[in-house]
Image (cartoon, grey):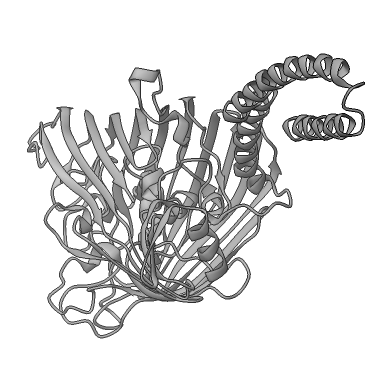
Amino acid sequence: MRLRSSLSALFCTTALLGTVSLMHPAAAADTQDAQLRELRREMLEMRSQIKALKSRLNEPDTNTRTARVAAAAHRSELSSRMAHDINIGEPIRPSVGVLNASGAGTPPSDRAVVESWKDFQAATKSDEEVAVGGMKIGFPNGRFTVQSKDGEYGLSIGLAFHEDFGGFITNNPRGHEAKGAFNAFTTNQRRLRIPFMFRYKNWVAAVTPDFGANHNDGYVGLYEGNLNYTGLRNTVLTVGYFQPRVTEEDAESSNDFMTLERPSITDMVRNIAAGDARFSVGGMHYEKRWWIAGYFTGQEWGHRNASDNGATYYGGGSGSVVDSQTGGVFRAAGRPVATKDWDVHLGGSAVSAFKVQGTGTNNRTTSFGQRPEFDIGEGSMAATGTIPFVSQIWAAGPELGVRWKNLLVKGEYYHVGVQRSQGLPTLGFQGWYGAVAYTLFGTPRMYNVKEGAWGAPGVKETEEFDPAHNKWGALEVVGHYSVIDLNSNANDPTAQSTSKMYNYYGVNGGQQTVWQGGLNWYPNRHFAIKADYSHFIVSRSQQTTDTLGRTGDSVEARVQATF
């Protein structure tokens, strides 16, 4: 603007001088010389001003630079506010990346991410993408996605890679016991899931093979294969093989776990009528302050195989399968307190196998057994053995979690009931855990409204691991105390016998206690290194082989990659 005004003034002055000289050539000569000298001076001054103005156009002035710095800081603050506000319920409209994550820079899920078409479109617009002909290719929410130009068709491919290694420092057999399968050092591909998501608008098909299924390296299985409709607000309706969400720990993605394995009681409860690749029909709905889900469930994938003799662990029998299992799960959770520094979670879960899988009315059995929360191929020390004549199995219990700034404390309790035919008494088992996590640096664990559970620590893009610039990602210290009690009517004489009457009236499966502590380091949202130390105490367990009780210690680490 100043450059334009100066040039206009120069043009007007020159034109005026030309007019005066034409009207009064003699009288104006002296005056013209003086004015020309003045004009030369002004032109030199204006030339200097023009040079300065050009320099300022190429280099923003101090105020502009200050404004740009302030704007960048404002954008960063706005991003943080958006990540937080979606949790506490303020009326903003962030991208689906914020909705799907519990905080900035959290790991992608280990599952197929099923979301509405509207949310899917919002996510693809908020991330880098390239156009190839009529297709768009990008990484919305950190997951590779190819979609049509209008977003109606889409294919996404993810990854959950968990490689575990470690061993038992001590494992002290007593009396005539053998050491068992408790290695000093071994490895296990705990999970190797590749989620495929095929989308047409609000219809999504999810197929996820797992090359680390069944807890064992080298076993290939199915984690999920289902159809979903997402056209209703904040609702997902599902049919097919699925992991019905029951218990707070099971609602979390395994990429978000505090310790490497779930507490024993939640793993036991989920396998009654939920767990991985369970046939399910139902749905879930979430809001910013509450979450609810319910599913009718059937058998697990692969349990129609007549040669499947391992089905008893999940409530089935061996040999030919006449009747598939039927059951159901229900979970509800609320969030009565949600502020910048505080979150409070309250909830409850219930699960039931109405009819247990078996080969006939009098041949329906079940069993419960848990490893000492260390899953690299070792055996179970707390176990009930086979329980015959089972008519129904159920479990129920409460959930509680509290976050204050970087500190999270949570826990759950469940009671398990086994009802039986032939006039046999009902058996009851129980378990509980308490867990704590403190984020030393990085974004702390925040609440994930889509799961009604807690997410992993987050790593903002500006804080990803870069030691040259003193950036270290996120680090948290964790610990938990876990108990599972598999004794019921244990004083009955048959609970102390190895005869054929074993487990008819009472069960002495033992009590297992685990103390565990660990560190979790996230250099960025896609990778993590985790390490746990465990001390376990297992009381006497009367099975086919007498286990007098053991104590021991183990160390385990995990390398994790998620996309």
Picture coordinates of residue 431, whole percent (x, y): 43, 45
Please give the name of the residue rendered at 29% of the width and 44% of the height, measured from the top-left corner: 561
Q: Nearer the viewer, residue 476 or 196?
A: 196
Picture coordinates of residue 169, whole percent (x, y): 16, 25
| Left or right of residue 487: residue 18 | right
Please give the name of the residue rendered at 46% of the width and 31% of the height, measured from the top-left corner: 462
Picture coordinates of residue 84, whole percent (x, y): 63, 41
Please give the name of the residue rendered at 47% of the width and 64% of the height, measured from the top-left corner: 351
Q: Residue furthest bottom?
A: 322
| Left or right of residue 82: residue 211 | left
- Residue 405 position by quadrant: top right
Q: Is residue 124 visible?
A: yes
Which image quarter is the N terminus in? top right
Q: Nearer the viewer, residue 232 or 466?
A: 466
Q: Nearer the viewer, residue 69 or 468?
A: 69
| Left or right of residue 52: residue 96 | left
- Give the vertical position of 33 relative to 545 (above or below): above
Q: Residue furthest front?
A: 26
- Give the vertical position of 104 relative to 147 (above or below): above
- Give the vertical position of 382 relative to 321 (above or below): above
Q: Is residue 551 visible?
A: no
